[in-house]
Amino acid sequence: MPPYAVCCDAVFLDTQLHLSYTYPIKKRVVSAPVNTAEILEEDFRFIFFRAEEDMRIVSDIPSPEDCTTLIFEFSGHEVEPKIAAELWPRILQHKWVLSEKLGRDVGSKVACVDFIENVEPVNRDLHDAERIQLLKELGAQMVDQSVWETISESQPPKQIVNKRIILPLTEIELARKHAVIPPRTIIFFGPPGTGKTHFVRAIAGILQWWYVEVSPSNLVADGEDRLGANLKRLMEKARNLDEAVLFIDEFEEIAGSRDHASRIDKSITNEFLKQVPLLKREDKKNLLVCATNYIRQLDAALLRPGRFDCIIPVGGLDDQGRRTIFEHYLSNTSRGDVDVDKIVSVISLFTPADIEYLFQKVRQVAFEREYLKGEDYRVTTETFLEMIPIVPATLTGEIIEEFQQDCAHYTRY
C-alpha cells in the first residue's frame, strides 16, 4: 500500500515522504493531481493524502500570523509574527530530528514545546526577542545608577527603601538565609513634588532594572470605558517582565475608593484588585510601584496587608536633603560665589520639584543677562535671593500637618 502523507510546505517528488515535516494547516492543497491523490481523512486540521509515484503535493506555507497561532497553541508562548515565521521551519526541522532519534513520528506539539523549552540557544533567543519586544511596547528605559546618589542619605524614605527593598534584592543569599521576602508591590504617598517619581527612578537605577512608567491618562487614551480593559492588558504584560520596575503615577485615578464611585470607576478598581495578586504570584524579579498625592482617596482594600507589601511616605526635605538636591543642580550651573547654607535655610518649604524649578528660572536669567550685556555672567547668591520670591513653595503648614497624620495612619513597611 502506498504511504500516507500529510499536507506540508515541501514538494514531494516520490514516495519517500517525511511525516516529520507535517503541521496543522488551515488551507487545503494548492495543487495535487486529482488522479494521484485523494483525501482520506481530515481530523484536527490535519489533511491526509494517499501519495503515489511522481506525485506532487504543494500546500500553502503558513503566514507569519498562522505561525504565531500554531506556536501559541502548541507551547503557550506568544511570539511576534515575524519571529514566529523564522522559528517555525526550525521547529519542523527539530521535529524531524526528534523523530529520527526516537524511531517514531513525534507530534508537532511535542516538538514545538521541546524546541522552545529545551533547545538552549534558541530558547534564549526566543525569550530575549519576546522580552525586547515587550519592553519596547511599554516604553522601558534604563536609569543611571548615579540617580540614587542625588537622594540624601538622611532622607527617611531612602533609608527605608534601602533596608526593605534594595538590600533584600541584592543580598539574595543573606535574605534567603533569614527568610526575608523582598517586597513586590509598593505605594509611595506624599504631597505633590516631593520626589516620589524620582525615588522610583532611583530604585530602578541602583538595581539596574528596566524602568517602565505608566500614567492613567495613557490608559484612558481610547476612551474611559476602555480603561479597565487597558489596565488588564498592561498588568498581563507586566507579569512577564523580569528585572523591571513598573511605575504607575497618579494611582488614585485608577484605584479610588468604591464607596461613592461610578460604575466604571468601581470596575476599574475591581480589576486592579484582581491583577495585583496575579502579578505577585509570578516568580519574576519585578516591582510594581504606585504613587499618589492623595492616599485618603485610595480604596481601603488596597491599603490592607496582602496586596501592597509596603506603604512608604515621601514628604518634605530636611536641611541635608535640600542641600544634596541644591548642590546637584548647582554643579551643572555656571556659577560664581553662592552661599549654599544661606539659600538652603531660605527654601525650607521647597520640594525637590520646587528646587528644580528655581534653577530653571535662575539659569534663564543668567542666559538672558549674558546675551543682553555680551559679557560673562555667573550665578551668585544674589541671583537666587532675587528669584526665590517668585517661585512659590509647594508645602504649607497645613499640608505638612495633613501629611503627618497620613504617615501615622497609613505607613507600613
Image: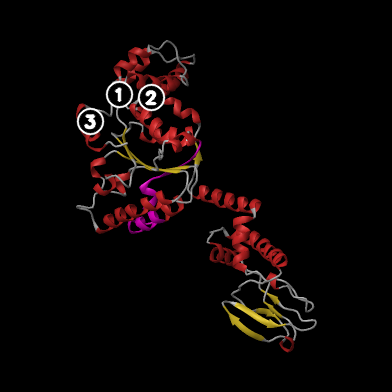
Between the C-alphas of marks 3 and 1, the distance is 27 Å
Quadrant for the C terminus in the image: top left
In the rendered image, which residue does mark 3 sit on? 404
Between the C-alphas of marks 2 and 1, the distance is 9 Å
Q: Is residue 290 left or right of residue 33?
A: left
Quadrant for the N terminus in the image: bottom right
Q: Residue furthest front?
A: 177
Q: Which residues are magenta?
A: 208-232
Amino acid beneath label 3: Gln
In the rendered image, which residue does mark 2 sit on? 361
Q: Position of residue 87 (x, y in %)?
A: 64, 59
Amino acid beneath label 1: Ile
Specify the label residue 390 is tagged with: 1
Q: Position of residue 51 (x, y in %)?
A: 73, 82
Using the rendered image of the protein, determine whether residue 297 is visible from the camera's viewpoint. Answer: yes
Name the residue located 23 percent from the left edge and 35 percent from the top edge. 406
**Mark 3 vs 1, N-terminal side:** 1
Using the rendered image of the protein, determine whether residue 368 is visible from the camera's viewpoint. Answer: no
Count residues near mark 3 (Cα–Cα under 10 Å), then give few for <14, some for 14-19, many for 20+: few
